Image: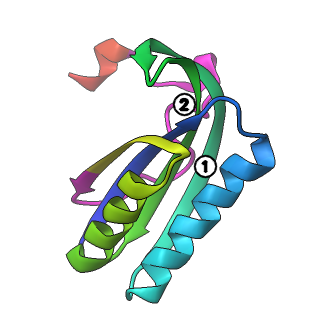
Amino acid sequence: MPLYEHVMIARQDLSNAQAEGLVEHFSTVLADNGGTVVESEYWGVKTMAYKINKNRKGHYAFLRTDAPSDAVQEMERLARLHDDVMRVLTVKVDAHEDGPSIQMQKRDERPDRRERR
């Protein structure tokens, strides 16, 4: 099955438990349609570069999934209809990276930009 990475932004006035509940909800949507969530991370409340629906901040969540495209399309459709979700970004990847995402790594653990060339 194809591998995907998703980033979701939820409204800022939700509690942490409600934001993590959204991640669980969309994980079950993927599981019901034949996909699996490999890893999920809750990044917390972050300030956005511009306002979305009159909100300056949002709850960010990151999902790594192994799911068929029909399951991903259904999850994205339900996320667009959900009032608490402001944005969803889905990217198809060749392989999932091991370890935490770059957002969860401490600054001194991150790879140097000059080393990536």
At label 1, the amino acid type is Glu
Residue depicted at 63% across the width and 66% down the height:
24
User: What stretch of residues is rendered in magenta?
Assistant: 91-112
At label 2, the amino acid type is Gln
Report the colour scheme: rainbow
Compute the Cα span from label 2 to label 1.
10 Å
Q: Is residue 41 magenta?
A: no
Q: Are marks 2 and 1 in contact (CB under 8 Å)?
A: yes
Figure quadrant of the N terminus: bottom left
Q: Going from the N terminus, do you reach mark 2 or mark 1 first? A: 1
Q: Position of residue 112 (x, y in %)?
A: 41, 17
Please identify the quarter of the rendering in which residue 23 is found: bottom right
Question: Dot 2: within a 10 Å radius of its alpha carbon, few (fewer than 14), some, or many (20 or more) residues?
Answer: few
Residue depicted at 61% across the width and 17% down the height:
108
Q: Position of residue 94 (x, y in %)?
A: 22, 59
98 up-or-down from 108: above or below: below
Please identify the quarter of the rendering in which residue 96 is found: bottom left
Query: Closer to the camera, 95 or 34?
Result: 34
* Number of the label disc, if any, that sits on residue 41: 1
Residue depicted at 61% across the width and 57% down the height:
22
